[in-house]
Amino acid sequence: MDWLDRVARLRRWTSNGARAPHKPLLLLYALGSHQQDAGRELRYSAVEQDLKRLLVEYGPAHPTTPAYPFHHLVSDGVWEVRTDRGAGSPGSGVGLLRSSGATGRLAPDLLAALRREPSLLGRLVRVLLDTHFPPSLHVELCEAVGLDLELAEVGAVNGAAAAARRQRDRQLRELVLTAYEFQCAFCGYDGMLGATSVGLEAAHVRWWSHDGPDEVDNGLCLCSLHHKLFDKGVLGLGDDRRILVSRRFVGRSEASRQHVLALVGRPVLGPQPGSPPVARRHREWHGRQVFHGAPRVPIGAGDGQCG
């Protein structure tokens, strides 16, 4: 069976070019759960809120429910649903799925294929991402569903390589954004699309790939621009929790002055009382391993280069 073709051809409701990413999002979530715990069943009542968040952030603008894909994905042959009474979905009603103890998991034939060929996981994820979402969302989508795409593409699932690689905490983004009150710690950006923050990300200070923990004291809430610049070493954190800007960064436009150079010496915004600030050991790691060169000196401190 060609699983890549089957996943690429998921049956979706379409009308006048409208997006319907409900099934792809559920399948990505299920593949992420499989990577962490192969064969795990997903009880609808336990994952409903996670799926709702995915639909709000990556789905269409109109209201929708995760009950729809949870029931209808069965018809594509990649998913099965059982209830307390046995095999089969009780329907697409939210109340029915909750009250019947409905659980879903990848179809047995697909699970068997993934066991025979672990690298299939990465290829399935790529098909789903490339078919239904723009490249700019691929990394954050994988993080949102708990998928390590690099690990998936080399075919390591629940083996020695997987054991050596830690699993990401899919709750970290929410914890970090809440600690910083849903605003960029560098510029204060706090954009929302309806009731959902947009353009804000949980940045690891010490990189996750280099033993940085999924903990609030290793995180910053940053807008997409400042997250990229922080990871590239343009921006950093000083001992006094003020923002550093590398002397190596050159920007002549008003946009560069406003969004980067004007940050020199500014205090970090947040976190709110009761939440831990960035730990010194993580800040120092970023300063040694990521930040480029010496920092610029704030205006009035003898340099005058940031204005």
Image (spheres, grey):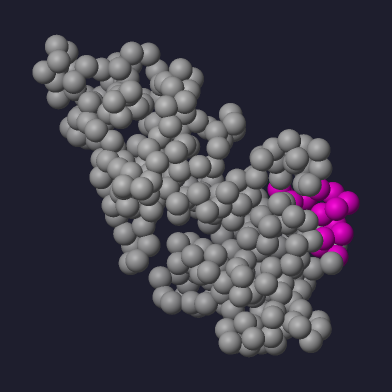
Residue 220 horizontal/vertical position (percent)? 40, 40
Quarter holding residue 198: bottom left
Q: Quadrant of the C terminus?
A: top left
* 174 in relation to 26, above or below: above
Q: Main secondary structure of the magenta part?
A: helix
Q: Residue furthest left?
A: 300
Number of numbered discs on residues: 0
Residue 17 seen anywhere in this rendered image of the structure: no
| Frontmost residue, 150 versus 83 | 83
* In magenta stretch: residue 107: no
At 63% across and 59% down in the image, what residue appears?
Answer: 28
Residue 43 % position (x, y): 67, 72
Q: In the rendered image, is residue 125 in sight? A: yes
Quadrant position of residue 162: top right
Identify which residue, 301 or 150, lies in the foreground: 301
Q: Kindly identify the residue that appears in the image at 61 percent across and 70 percent down.
A: 46
Q: In this view, does 119 lie to the left or right of 235?
A: right
Residue 1 in the figure: left or right of residue 165: right
> In which image quadrant can residue 243 be found?
top left
Where residue 152 appears, as percent x and y from the top left, is 71, 45
Which quadrant holds the N terminus? bottom right
Q: Residue at x 18, y 17 (%)?
A: 305
Question: The magenta stretch spans which residues?
Answer: 109-123
Task: Give 262 or 215, whichever is nearer the viewer.
Answer: 215
Q: Is residue 186 above or below residue 236?
A: below
140 versus 298 height, above or below: below
112 in magenta: yes
Residue 291 location in percent, x, y?
41, 21
- Tell me if 93 is positioned left or right of 8 in this view: left
Image point (71%, 52%), residue name: 36
Relative to residue 35, is residue 229 depicted above or below? above
